[in-house]
Amino acid sequence: MKKTKQKMFTKQEWSWIFYDWANSAYSIFIATVLPIFASSVARVSGIDSVTHTANWGYTSAIACVLVALSSPILGTLADYKGVRKRFFIAFFLLGVLSTGIIPIANSYIAVLIIYGITNFGFAGANVFYDAFLLDVTTNDRMDKVSSWGFGMGYIGGSTIPFLVTIALNLFGERIGVDGTMTMQISCFLTAIWWAVFTLPLIFNVKQISGIEREPHMVANSFKRLGHTLKNIKKHKFLFIFLIAYFFYIDGVGTIIKMATTYGDALGIDSTALMVGLLITQVVAFPCAIIYGKLASRFSSKKMILVGIVTYFAVCVVGYFMKSATEFYILAGLVGTAQGGIQALSRSYFGKAIPDKRQAGEFFGFFSIFSKFESVLGTFLMSTVITLTNNINLGVVSILLTFIIGGTLMLFVPDDKNLEQAKAITE
């Protein structure tokens, strides 16, 4: 009898993975095109680079705080059967539509406000997207699926639209496309890409786990939120992981959000900045997959620690960075760890959740920490820059987030001991 070859991924897993492909177009857009555009608007408005760098950091922090504060209750509500996708679609549409209207911004303040709104929509949709991970796959496949999500995002969503933007930036004038039109095309391409490649998730992924609907869902959601908080405290290893995650992912998020603004302030031209970040995307694709494979051999915990050490090196290199060549080296180094540390953090937490029916609730709390990503780092960086008027010293402050996060990660169990750790606190 002929043996049937097992598919690499199921239809649901592929559909979930492709949302990373979809929304990564936005991730690279706010890391490259939008900061460069905002910097140019700031210069026209008479705002110096140091002040703009600080303002950009404060705007990022505010948007993250808004998502973090709303995520727990939204995640709890989304655990009711048939509700999770509705919340996902609402935040997804907010992000896509606001991205599409960026070209109409006619002032520096308007650019900052719309940036904050797009960030809110993007981050909010990710709360429910992450929770769907438990609906589409099993614990033993979670590292692989999560890593491939980030990997596909880097090689597809973060690269293809970005290449179009780079080409327009380099050669657009030859065909009558100026800098303003390049910005407009990039906005529309990002929004369309994000929307089209989200359709597989919308049509093929369903909420499997959840609780039955009941009267007074909002009031009862607040009650369940308190119960979930007690559950997290009861599972001490889960609580320690969340605190560790808060610190090290904050450092990761700060570097993602501030890299282009930081490079621009050091005098690196826009083309070099975009090429450097393209290097990050290309390197990140295979490295995210490799992190997933190595996690199956050495554990997610150990590979997360490898990523933290890598980012520590990134901060040190960033402090001494002065030229475009050094920016390229830094971008490549970031690419080796960026996708892996994010993917394995998501899958480690998913495996650690004690009850899949409460996936939304737990990922709501996870979102508090993941959406505070860059709140502490951007605030520290902006404050240090403001107080010292020294761009380079701002990078040094980010080291603190990785030191604390890495130290706390030493006290959580390896993947193979998770079930035993959960059973002890039952």
Image (tube, rainbow, N blue to C red):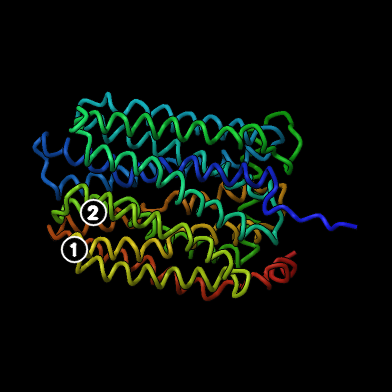
Amino acid type assigned to the residue bearing label 2 in the image: Ser
Residue 421 position in % (x across, y down): 69, 70
Which residue appears farthest toward the left when viewing the image? 46
* Quarter in which the C terminus is drawn: bottom right
Residue 241 position in % (x across, y down): 54, 65
Residue 159 position in % (x across, y down): 40, 47
- Whether residue 385 sits left or right of residue 401 in the image: it is left
User: Dot 1 surroundings within 10 Å: few (below 14), some, or many (20 or more)?
Assistant: many
Identify the residue at horizontal 38%, vertical 32% (top origin).
189
Residue ID for mark 2: 382
Which residue appears farthest toward the front when viewing the image? 2
Residue 387 sits in quarter: bottom left
Q: Nearer the viewer, residue 206 or 383?
A: 206
Identify the residue at horizontal 19%, vertical 59% (top origin).
324
Which residue appears farthest toward the right when viewing the image? 1
Q: Nearer the viewer, residue 237 or 322?
A: 322
Mark earlier in primary sequence (2, 1): 2
Residue ID for mark 1: 392
Q: CA distance from mark 2 to mark 1?
A: 11 Å
For mark 1, give the secondary structure.
helix
Identify the residue at horizontal 58%, vertical 55% (top origin).
146
Residue 229 position in % (x across, y down): 61, 53
For mark 2, give the secondary structure.
helix
User: Is residue 285 positioned above or below 12 on the image?
Assistant: below
User: Dot 2 surroundings within 10 Å: few (below 14), some, or many (20 or more)?
Assistant: many
- Whether residue 52 sits left or right of residue 115 in the image: it is left
* Quarter in which the N terminus is drawn: bottom right
Amino acid type assigned to the residue bearing label 1 in the image: Asn
